[in-house]
Image (cartoon, coloured by chain):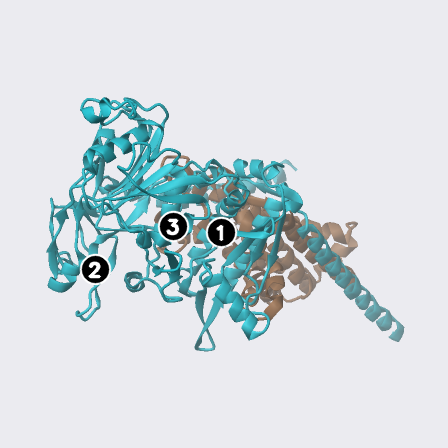
Chain colours: A cyan, B brown
C-alpha cells in the first residue's frame, strides 16, 4: 500500500517534471523563433510592409555606402503606448537592416541614465542645440496621484562620422495618458518609414537643390520664417533673392517661395517669374488678397479687411487658379487669444484648421492652421495642366463676404456650434484653400508682352513651357510664420540666430485650443514635393487606404442590415440543427 | 453535434456579436464605426469566446470523471491521446462552425463599403484565421481545466480565469512599470499581444509558433494528467 502510494507520488512528480520541461522547451522555441524575421502582409495595400522604392534604395549598393547610426533616445521606463512606439521603431529598423545589411546600425539610449550633469547636458543638446527633439511630458495617474514622465521621442542620426540630422517620432508637449496619446503614437508609427527614409535620403544626397525665398515686395522677413527654414535647411540650399535685379535672377534655382507679399509686383518681376515657370520652374505662392490687422481687432474689437494689390492674383489667374477676395469661416477653427474678456479667447472662425486631401503633400499631416485664408478656384484654361486640390476647409464652412468686416461679436452671432451651411456634412461645401497645377503652362505675357522685354534680346521670351513646371498656390500667406521659436539678430555674424523662445511651451493660441497643428510638416512636404524628391515622394504618395463605409446607405438601409445579420445567422444554426437531427434519425431508421 | 449545448453556444455567440456589432451604440458598433472592416468583431469575439468556450469545455472531462464514465472510456481500446484529441477537436470545430454564420457580417460590410467592396478582404481572412487560432488556444486551456478537476463549475471558473489571464491579464500586468524591466516579457507571453498583428492582417512566424505552443503545451499537460489519474 505504502509502496503504491510512493509510486503514485513519484509518478505525479514525474509528470510535473516533464510538464515543466515542456514549458521550458516551448519558451525556448518561442525565443528562438522571435529571431526569425518571417512575416507575410496580407493587407491589400501592404500597409504593414516597406514600400518598393524604399526596398530598392536600401538594396542599392551605391546609395548607402557607409555606416549610418541611429541613436534613439527611447529607452527607460515608459507607459505601454510608448513601449509600442519603441518596439515599432526597432521592428522598422530591423526591416531596414534586412535589406541594407550592416550599413544600418542603431542603439537605444536612455537619456535619464548617468549623472545629473550628463543628463542635463544631453537633454540640452537634444532640445536646445537645434536638434529639435522636444521633450514630451506624459501625465499619468497612479495611486491617486498625478505623475509626469518626460521622454525624448526622437533619434539623432550620424553618417560618415558626422551628424546628419534628427528624427522626431512624436511632437513634444504635454499629454495625458488617457487622451489622444494612443492615436498620436499610431500616427507616429505609420510615419516611421517616411521619417527614416527622409533622413537616409538626406544623408546620402550628393547635391542639394536650391530653394529661393523672393523678397522686395513686403514678403515675410527672414526672421519670420526661421522656424520653417530650420525644417528644410539641411536638405536644401536656401537663398534669398530680390527680383528685378536681373532677368536671370532665378537661373539655377529649383524652386521659389513667395510668402505673403504686400506690395505690387512690377511687370518686370512678374515677367521673371513667368519665364521661370516656362523653363520648368517650381513656384509656391502663399498669398491672400485680403489683409486683416489683428492689432486693430484686439484694440477695438473689430476691423475691416483691406485689399492688398500685389498683382499676383492676376498672374495666377492666367495659369488657372483664381484666388477669391474673401475670407473663409469654418466650424473647424482655432481660438484667438483676446485678453480682457473672461474666457481669455474667442472662438475665431477665421483661424481655419484646414484639412488635407489624399494628395501626398497633405494626406498625412495634422490639420494646417490658416489664419485668414481666402478660397481658391480652378479656372478652365486651354493649358495642359493637371490640377490637384491640396487643402480644403471642412464641410461646415463658407466663404465670408467681399472684403468683410470682422468682429469678435461673431462668436455670439454664430453660437458655440456654428452652422455655416444648410447641410453641414455635405462634402460639396468644402472650399479649396490650396491648389496645385502641374504640367505645361502658357505664358501670362503671351498676348500682352511688354515691348521692353520683347525687344530685349536678353529676355529670350518663351511662349509655352519648354519643361513641365509646378505651381502651388495657398490662399494664405502666414501659415509658415514662426510659431514656437523666435530669432535674434547677431551683430557679429550679421545673421539671425534661431532660438527656442521658451522651452516646453507651445504657442499661446495653440495652448488654448489644445490642438496640434501640422503647419511645418505641411510646409516641409510642399517643398519636398515641389522640388521633386522622388524617393521620398513614393513613400509619401503611398496611400494607406481608409476603407470608409457608405454613410448614406447606412442611414437608409441600416435597419435592413441589422435585420439581415440576425435572421440569416440564426436561421443557419437552426437549419443546421434540423439537418443534423434528420440525418441522425434517417441513419437510425436505416439501421 | 449531438448535444443541444453546441447549438446554444452558436446561438449565444451569434446573438451577442450581433447585439454589440449592430445594435448597441458603443465602441464595437460596425454601423457607426465609419470604416468598412470587421476589426470591431475581431476585438469583440475573443471576449465572447472567453466566456463561452470554458462553458462548453467544462464538462468534457470533469463530468466524465464525476459520473465515473471515465473508467468506461478507459476500458475501450482507444488511447488517451485520441480521447483527448477527439474532445479537443470537437471543441475547435464547434468554434469554427459558430464563426461561419458571422460570414453575413462580412458580406454586409462588403456591401456597406463606399464604394462597394472596398473592404480589405485579405486582411479580413487573415484576421479570421487569427480568431480560429485564438479560439483553439482557449479550447486547449478549457480542456486542460476540465481535466484537472472533477467539478464542472470549478473547471469553468478555472478555464475562465486562465483564458482571461492569458488573453488580457498578462498584458495588463505588463502595462506601465508594474514589474520594471519584466513588463515587456510579460506582455510577450500574452495572447492579445500575438493576436494584435494577425488581427490587422499580418502573419508573423513568431505569432503562429506562439499560438501552437499554447495549444500543444496545454494539451500535453492535460494528457499527462489524464495518464497520471488513470488508476
Q: Kindly identify which chain the residue marked by label 2 belongs to.
A: A
| Picture quadrant of residue B167 | bottom right
Give how far across and how far down residue A58 sits, in percent: 59, 40
Q: Secondary structure at mark 3?
A: helix
Q: Kindly identify which chain the residue marked by label 3 belongs to.
A: A
Which is more toward the observer, B226 or B71? Answer: B226
Q: Earlier in the sequence, mark 2 or mark 1?
A: 1
Let me know if residue A318 appears in the view.
yes
Q: Earlier in the sequence, mark 3 or mark 1?
A: 1
Side of A577 where A524 appears, left or right: left
Asked if both marks, 2 and 3, belong to the same chain, the answer given is: yes
**Residue at label 2?**
A347
User: Alpha carbon of mark 3 to alpha carbon of mark 1: how far?
Assistant: 26 Å
Give how far across and how far down residue A579 sits, in percent: 53, 39
The dot on residue A189 is 1
Residues under numbered marks 2 and 3 in contact, where contact means CB atoms less than 8 Å apart: no
Task: For marks 3 and 1, give the one nearer the viewer.
Answer: 3
Let me know if residue A548 appears in the view.
no
Amino acid at each position: 500500500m505504502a509502496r503504491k502510494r510512493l509510486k503514485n507520488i513519484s509518478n505525479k512528480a514525474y509528470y510535473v517534471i516533464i510538464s515543466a520541461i515542456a514549458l521550458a522547451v516551448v519558451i525556448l522555441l518561442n525565443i528562438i523563433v522571435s529571431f526569425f524575421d518571417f512575416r507575410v502582409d496580407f493587407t491589400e495595400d501592404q500597409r504593414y510592409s516597406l514600400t518598393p522604392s524604399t526596398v530598392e534604395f536600401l538594396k542599392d549598393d551605391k546609395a548607402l555606402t557607409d555606416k549610418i547610426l541611429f541613436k534613439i533616445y527611447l529607452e527607460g521606463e515608459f507607459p505601454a503606448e510608448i513601449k509600442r512606439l519603441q518596439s515599432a521603431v526597432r521592428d522598422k529598423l530591423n526591416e531596414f537592416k534586412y535589406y541594407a545589411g550592416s550599413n544600418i546600425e542603431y542603439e537605444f539610449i536612455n537619456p535619464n541614465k548617468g549623472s545629473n550633469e550628463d543628463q542635463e547636458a544631453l537633454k540640452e543638446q537634444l532640445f536646445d542645440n537645434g536638434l529639435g527633439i522636444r521633450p514630451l511630458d506624459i501625465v499619468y495617474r497612479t495611486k491617486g496621484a498625478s505623475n509626469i514622465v518626460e521622454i525624448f521621442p526622437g533619434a539623432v542620426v550620424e553618417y560618415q562620422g558626422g551628424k546628419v540630422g534628427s528624427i522626431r517620432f512624436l511632437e513634444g508637449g504635454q499629454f495625458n495618458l488617457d487622451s489622444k496619446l494612443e492615436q498620436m503614437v499610431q500616427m507616429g508609427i505609420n510615419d516611421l518609414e517616411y521619417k527614416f527614409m527622409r533622413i537616409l535620403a538626406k544623408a546620402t544626397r550628393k547635391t542639394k537643390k536650391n530653394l529661393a525665398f523672393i523678397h522686395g515686395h513686403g514678403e515675410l522677413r527672414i526672421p519670420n520664417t526661421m522656424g520653417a527654414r530650420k525644417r528644410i535647411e539641411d536638405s536644401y540650399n536656401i537663398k534669398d533673392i530680390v527680383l528685378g535685379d536681373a532677368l536671370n535672377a532665378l537661373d539655377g534655382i529649383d524652386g521659389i517661395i513667395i510668402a505673403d507679399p504686400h506690395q505690387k509686383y512690377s511687370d518686370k518681376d512678374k515677367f521673371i517669374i513667368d519665364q521661370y515657370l516656362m523653363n520648368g520652374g517650381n513656384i509656391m505662392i502663399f498669398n491672400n488678397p485680403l489683409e486683416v490687422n489683428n492689432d486693430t481687432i484686439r484694440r477695438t474689437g473689430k476691423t475691416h479687411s483691406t485689399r492688398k494689390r500685389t498683382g499676383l492674383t492676376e498672374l495666377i489667374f492666367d495659369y488657372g487658379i483664381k484666388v477669391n477676395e474673401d475670407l473663409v469661416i469654418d466650424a473647424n477653427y482655432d481660438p484667438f487669444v483676446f485678453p480682457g474678456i473672461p474666457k481669455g479667447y474667442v472662438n475665431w472662425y477665421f483661424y481655419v484648421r484646414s484639412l488635407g486631401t489624399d494628395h501626398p503633400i497633405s494626406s498625412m499631416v495634422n490639420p494646417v492652421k490658416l489664419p485668414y485664408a481666402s478660397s481658391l478656384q480652378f479656372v478652365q484654361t486651354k493649358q495642359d495642366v493637371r490640377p490637384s486640390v491640396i487643402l480644403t476647409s471642412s464641410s461646415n464652412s463658407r466663404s465670408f463676404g467681399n472684403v468683410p468686416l470682422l468682429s469678435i461679436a461673431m462668436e455670439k452671432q454664430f453660437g458655440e456650434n456654428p452652422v455655416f451651411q444648410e447641410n453641414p456634412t455635405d462634402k460639396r461645401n468644402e472650399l479649396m484653400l490650396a491648389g496645385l497645377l502641374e504640367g505645361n503652362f502658357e505664358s501670362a505675357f503671351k498676348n500682352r508682352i511688354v515691348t521692353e522685354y520683347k525687344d530685349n534680346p536678353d529676355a529670350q521670351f518663351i511662349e509655352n513651357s519648354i519643361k513641365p513646371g509646378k505651381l502651388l498656390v495657398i490662399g494664405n500667406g502666414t501659415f509658415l510664420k514662426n510659431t514656437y521659436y523666435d530669432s535674434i539678430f547677431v551683430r557679429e555674424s550679421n545673421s539671425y540666430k534661431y532660438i527656442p523662445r521658451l522651452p516646453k511651451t507651445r504657442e499661446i493660441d495653440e495652448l488654448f485650443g489644445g490642438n496640434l497643428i501640422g503647419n511645418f510638416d505641411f510646409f516641409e512636404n510642399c517643398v519636398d514635393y515641389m522640388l521633386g524628391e522622388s524617393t521620398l515622394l513614393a513613400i509619401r504618395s503611398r496611400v494607406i487606404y481608409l476603407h470608409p463605409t457608405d454613410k448614406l446607405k447606412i442611414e437608409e438601409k441600416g435597419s435592413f442590415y441589422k435585420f439581415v445579420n440576425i435572421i440569416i445567422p440564426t436561421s443557419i444554426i437552426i437549419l443546421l440543427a434540423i439537418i443534423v437531427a434528420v440525418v441522425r434519425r434517417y441513419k437510425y431508421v436505416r439501421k | 453535434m449531438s448535444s443541444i449545448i453546441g447549438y446554444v453556444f452558436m446561438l449565444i455567440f451569434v446573438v451577442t456579436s450581433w447585439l454589440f456589432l449592430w445594435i448597441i451604440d458603443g465602441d464595437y458598433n460596425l454601423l457607426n464605426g465609419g470604416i468598412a472592416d470587421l476589426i470591431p468583431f475581431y476585438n469583440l469575439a475573443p471576449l465572447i469566446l472567453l466566456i463561452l468556450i470554458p462553458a462548453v469545455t467544462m464538462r468534457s472531462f470533469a463530468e466524465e470523471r464525476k459520473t465515473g464514465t471515465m473508467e468506461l472510456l478507459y476500458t475501450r481500446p482507444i488511447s488517451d491521446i485520441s480521447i483527448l484529441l477527439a474532445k479537443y477537436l470537437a471543441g475547435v470545430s464547434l468554434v469554427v462552425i459558430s464563426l461561419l454564420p458571422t460570414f453575413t457580417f462580412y458580406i454586409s460590410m462588403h456591401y456597406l463599403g463606399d464604394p462597394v467592396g472596398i473592404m480589405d478582404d485579405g486582411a479580413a481572412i487573415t484576421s479570421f484565421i487569427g480568431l480560429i487560432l485564438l479560439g483553439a488556444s482557449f479550447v486547449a486551456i478549457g480542456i486542460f481545466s476540465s481535466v484537472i478537476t472533477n467539478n464542472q463549475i470549478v473547471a469553468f471558473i478555472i478555464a475562465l480565469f486562465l483564458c482571461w489571464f492569458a488573453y488580457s491579464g498578462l498584458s495588463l500586468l505588463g502595462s506601465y512599470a508594474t514589474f520594471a524591466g519584466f513588463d515587456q516579457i510579460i506582455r510577450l507571453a500574452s495572447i492579445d499581444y500575438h493576436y494584435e498583428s494577425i488581427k490587422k492582417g499580418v502573419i508573423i512566424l513568431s505569432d503562429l509558433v506562439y499560438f501552437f505552443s499554447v495549444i500543444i503545451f496545454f494539451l500535453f499537460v492535460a494528457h499527462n494528467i489524464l495518464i497520471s489519474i488513470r488508476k
